[in-house]
Image: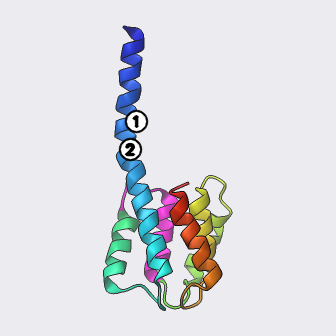
Amino acid sequence: MKKLTQGLMISLLLLLAAPAAQAADAAMNTMVNIVIHLNHFPSDEEIATLKDISESQTVSPGERTLAGALMRLKHTVTDEDAAELKALEADDSASENERKLAGILVNIAHHPDEEQKKELQMILMSGSQ
């Protein structure tokens, strides 16, 4: 009986954690797709989506930082955002994909180059890590 109860508790915890993980994957995938198609700055619709991500409590602090920086990007990230992105890129507690996207955003000029697009595609293929 004790093992059954423990099994049910673990299953319940996994079910409760799954939506948060899916939200994080969705947020990262959304941001990566925006960057892949970026042309100087995000569209008004993309900015609204990024604002939602930056204010969401279901994504990580790193994803909120990324969404905010991308939302304010005009040809390049702001100096303030560049400093935050560099800190995120060096943060071992951030996910690998958060660090990669931070590095790409710091170095982007107007739109991603071909190498950056390859890195972004790799992030999409890897899921949220």
Residue 13 to residue 96: above or below? above
Q: Residue at x 36, y 79 (%)?
A: 46
Query: Residue flagged by tag 1: what amino acid is it?
Result: Leu
Q: Are marks 2 and 1 in contact (CB under 8 Å)?
A: yes
Q: Residues within 10 Å of mark 1 (few under 14, many from 20)?
A: few
Question: Distance of mark 2 from mark 1, alpha carbons?
Answer: 6 Å
Does residue 18 belong to the magenta stretch? no
Residue 83 seen: no
* Amino acid at circle 2: Ala
Label 2: element kind: helix
Label total for image:
2
Residue numbers of the magenta segment: 56-72
Q: Residues within 10 Å of mark 2 (few under 14, many from 20)?
A: few
Q: Residue 14's mark?
A: 1
Q: Which color mode does the image show? A: rainbow
Write the residue at 55% across / 58% down.
126
Please name whichever residue, 67 or 21, is drawn nearer the observer in this view of the structure: 21
Q: Is residue 57 magenta?
A: yes
Relative to residue 90, is residue 39 depicted above or below?
below
The one nearer the camera, 112 or 20, is 112
Q: Which residue is mark 2?
A: 18
Quarter placement of the C terminus: bottom right
Q: Position of residue 2 (x, y in %)?
A: 40, 10
